[in-house]
Image (spheres, coloured by chain):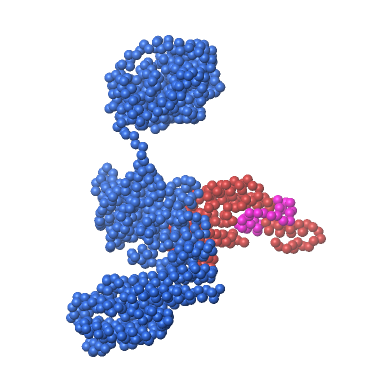
Chain colours: A blue, B red
Amino acid sequence: MPCERKPMRYGHSEGHTDVTFDDAGKFIVTCGSDGDVRIWESLDDDDPRSINVGEKAYSLALKRKLVTAGSNNTVQIHTFPEGDPDGILTRFTTHATHVAFNHSGSRVAAGSSDFMVKVVEVADSSQQKTLRGHDAPVLSVTFDPKDELLYPGCSRPCNLTVVVHLQTKVTSWPVLQKSNDVSTAKSLCRLGWQPKTAKLLAVPVGLKVHLYERDSWEHVSTLSDDMMTQPINVVAWSPCGQLLAAGSVGGFLTVWNAESKLCVERQKHEKGYTVCGLAWHPSGRQLAYTDTQGSLGLLDDLPTASSATKTPKAPAVKAANDYDDLFDEDDDRAMDEGLSDTHSPAKRPVAGGDDDDDDDLMPATGRVKNRSSFLDDENSLDTVSLALGQGKYGDDDDAGSTVAPPTGPSLPLRPAYEGPLPTLPQKPFQPGSTPAHLTHRFMTWNSVGVVRGYNDDQDNAVDVEFHDTAVHHAMHLTNALGHTLADLSQEAVLLACPATDELASKLQCLHFSSWDANKEWIVDLPAGEDVRALVLGQGWAAAATSARTLRLFTVGGVQKEIFSLPGHVVSMAAHGEQLLVVYHRGTGFDGDQALGVQLLQLGRRKRQVIHGEPLPLSCKAHLAWLGFTAEGTPCYVDSEGVVRMLNRSLGNTWTPVCNTRETCKGKSDHFWVVAVHENPQQLRCIPCKGSRYPPTLPRPAVAILPFKLPLCQTTTEKGQMEEQYWRSTLLQNHYSFLSSSGYEIDDEGQNQNQKEQQELLMKMFALSCKLEREFRCMELAELMTQSVVTLAVRYASRSRRMNLAQRLNELAMEKANQLQEEQEQEEEEVYGQRESAGGHSSSRSHQAREEEPREEEEDESQETETLEADGESRKRKSPSQSRVSNVLDSMTSVRRPAPLGGPSGKQSKGPVLKPLAPKPKTKMQSTLLQMATSKAANKKAQVNPEPAADRLKQPEVPPPDLPVEDSENQKPRTGFQLWLEENRKSILADSPDLQETDVIKAAMGSFRSLSAEDRLSWTERAKGQSGEAADLKKRKRVEEAGEGDESRVKADENIAKKKKSLDTTAKLSAFAFNKN
Amino acid sequence: MDPTEVEFLAEKEIVKIIPNFSLDKIYLIGGDLGPFNPGLPVQVPVWLALNLKQRQKCRILPPQWMDVDKLEEVREMERKEDSFTPPPSPYYMELTKLLLNHASDNIPKADEIRTLVKDIWDTRIAKLRLSADSFISQQEAHAKLDNLTLMEINTTRSFLLGSLNCMFKLRSNMQPGTSTGKGPDY
């Protein structure tokens, strides 16, 4: 049965107040900071009697007489209800904080801010006893019905002290939060003794009320209420001793049944002001309360104890009625004893030996008990057994668990867990959006434009605006469906709303770039599925739902693939054909999020690039932004402001490229990232002063932040250059990615980039040189390209570091060789692919000539093998190469080295185009020669013009005769070539209108049809010839003595190289000396 | 000098705009401008900013000083000091007029700013008149005024010089023996 909350009414001016009922319950008596005590006949009394007691009244107590604690450091007595002053009871050095009568009304206890408590005989104010030894302002005092005194102080150690018989400090609990003044104390800590039985003491401790048992001073149970969010200020027992009312700082009023620990009543102060006074009507039906704003309120028709309590033991309490007299006697005796006993009562408790023990031990045990009730199972079991022994608190297992979690028996059900605490998983979000609870918010802000959502009284609308008005004009849509998610691309706007009771979650797409008249489509999601994140790619859209599925659509609205995500989605981003999904991989602990990331390629070749690996975040951070750079590299920002970028060249790792918090001026300033660009290196973000996200108005302006890798010692020159170098390398990765995925790339930019890198390396090299760090120089040189190494060689030799120069030289050699090999391989691969295509077409032409294409191909491969067997294709190792190789292949690969060899000697005169020549030998030669030239000239190595040569070859098929002769002059020849020369005419005669290539193919066919012996003989002849040709060549035989003559065996190659390099070194060092 | 000429000079000042189009760097005699990226602030002279704004090609970001709080501070300062305080910008009046007339929708609290700038202007002009008055009444030969903007000098020049001329003529006529008052024109 709910009670009636009467409206609050003005009682006093703003400030602390106190309230009580008179003994008969006829009046409500209040005091307030205006210094008045008002006596109300009821709450509706419009003309209460006022008694002025001083400038301020802090507390009052009423028992036949009115005792007030006033501002002039006095405790005064007034007659009641007349209100005539009846003298000053006692004085303090500061104002008294609380006054309380004992049960019989014979004594008054007053606590004050000067750490003292005084107990004064009402009849004779000279009979007073001072309790010192406390080290904090006294918050409140109370007598128990047996006349023990209790007062809590409020500073270190925050104690609640019980003094029995006014002399012995029995126990103290360190339960209160410390403070240095009553005004700063979190809670007034008004205590309450259970009336009549005086079994229990209620102490407001934080959000709970602790119940302590008398005599043993054990903490027996705790009353709490989930609604209580702020500390409890006051507690008051109902006159029957069964109900306990508590008023809290936040204005909550709660009434518990102390036995069942059930909350029987719960009210909220109508304005949420702090309740600072609480009093029960003697009938137990009304509860008066006052707040710190001076208002008085009343709860009427409260359930009585008997009606509220259903515990069978309730009546038992009522039995103890006749205690009062007994205790009164007791009181007097104690008082007398106390007075006669001591002159300096404060010292007394500490003096005696036994008491000493108590003092030392009790707080300690008290502390343990106190904690134990929360954490320690064993101890709390003790408490329970104690309670059981009393036979009063054992039966609340079922009843108590509903409202007030009791400390006792239910504890074992909640095992104490002290390990790392799980983090709340972060909510899904759209990158570049501000929180959904805002009425004006950005639904998304990306590189295309801005989608704003307005959701206020007049308007529920979505504004779409494009950065580039050339894309589309701005749009204003009414948001009838209540969209909360949005994404924007060059083609469309995608919106989604969560499901409501009637309507399913919807996905709406405004496909403004569509060329037909229908520019909009809507899709309903299945019941129970909500869109959590959505994204627009190029020509497709994706939506991740609460069912952990990811649905793909075309931008026109065709449903495509659907797949499941391993966890709840956090965010998604798209770029072109790439889709990046971040989801919850599991539960994070201690503030960390456990996120996983998937990167999918959704083009024609669908594949997963990153397979759900953990997403690295800063400590205790969550994901704040997810996206791609304009160049298509995945990138994200966490709540600590660290921007990380995917490093594709380091096995798809994430590299931190910037920390936006470092650039923030204030501690609470943030940068709200909207886009990342790699070329130029820009982090586009909106500076937000004192918040994490920008407001919609005034329109925020984008600022640009530079990248900065968090390398060590970036203040030094070395660190700076290293940072620049690695940043440049990292941000150059997108070139290779773009070219590999078939996009056009900015060659100029890339070259520029590389040039800068090499310059940086050279600078670092020079710096290390200066610092005499030759080893470091070598390490740097390893990163350089071959041409720059040669520069470094020059630098080293010029600065007279011959050792370094020599090592660098070797390195340069190696690099040159590597480069060469790589290029060869690449070419072979490329041409191999091309030729295989070409091969098919040629085989088709063969088909026309009624030849079996399959056989043909097989034959061809056989042919190549024989060629290899001839020792001319040494360099080709992979079987695939030999498989694909055919006539054209050998043609092109021969052609390639020709221009390279060009400048080196007379043998090759420019790009000679000849149909067939044994390539390996030429290749070998040209390699070495080219190396020599490049070394000697200290020039940039070769930018290989073979594509050009290739192109040259295609249009103009040279006249057959000339090249053959040319090739005769320079190249060793195969048996096939010799055979071809002899038989060319006959072939041409057979089919005069053949193209050169076709001629060769035809020739190849007929050559193959020769018997093996014949072919062998041709090969023999060719070998003989090539030997002669080699002899004729005007090469530097001296240097390459071992090389030219010997059959080209692999091992020899190396020797030759070494010789070569030594030679160059010698040359170079000579050069260096000349220079110097 | 005409006020329009002063305004013309003020148009050389640099402001930030947010273009809504994309354009490469443009190479002008006065220097290179751009590149223009949609949504990204870029610095351009006022004349270009206004031109683009009129064609609805950009959004103008108000200069730093064009802010209610800062202008209020300047105004208070200006009222407190007897001498001229440094103006918020050497072309504050011209820029305010130009930007507020053409791009008031991009400037938050445009009306307040207009009032504030007008206040500052009035205060300064009053000071100028006052100092001109004391200059003439005390018959000083020269005076030094700091922190005047071109526009302010320009508004007072013609009148002050004309009146000085006049006075010179009158004085030379008053003194017997001197010539017919053909003093050199200032």
Q: Which of A216 and A395 is in front in this view?
A: A216
Using the rendered image of the protein, determine whether residue A473 is visible from the camera's viewpoint. Answer: no
Residue B158 lies in the magenta stretch: yes
Which one is nearer the viewer's eye here, A662 or A283? A662
Measuring from the top left, give residue A869's x and y in whole percent.
27, 77
The quadrant where residue A264 appears = top left
Is residue A360 something one can see in this rendering?
yes
Q: Is residue A87 left or right of residue A495?
A: right
Q: Position of residue A956 (x, y in %)?
A: 33, 82
Residue at the spot 38% in from the left edge and 23% down from the top edge = A218
Q: Quadrant of the N terminus of chain A?
A: top left
Residue drawn at 25 percent across, 78 percent down: A866
At a point 32% along the width and 82% down the height, the residue shown is: A917
Residue A374 relative to residue A295: left or right = left
Q: Is residue B73 above or below residue A52?
A: below
Q: For the magenta stretch, what is the residue range? A: B134-159
Drawn side of residue B139 relative to residue A956, left or right: right
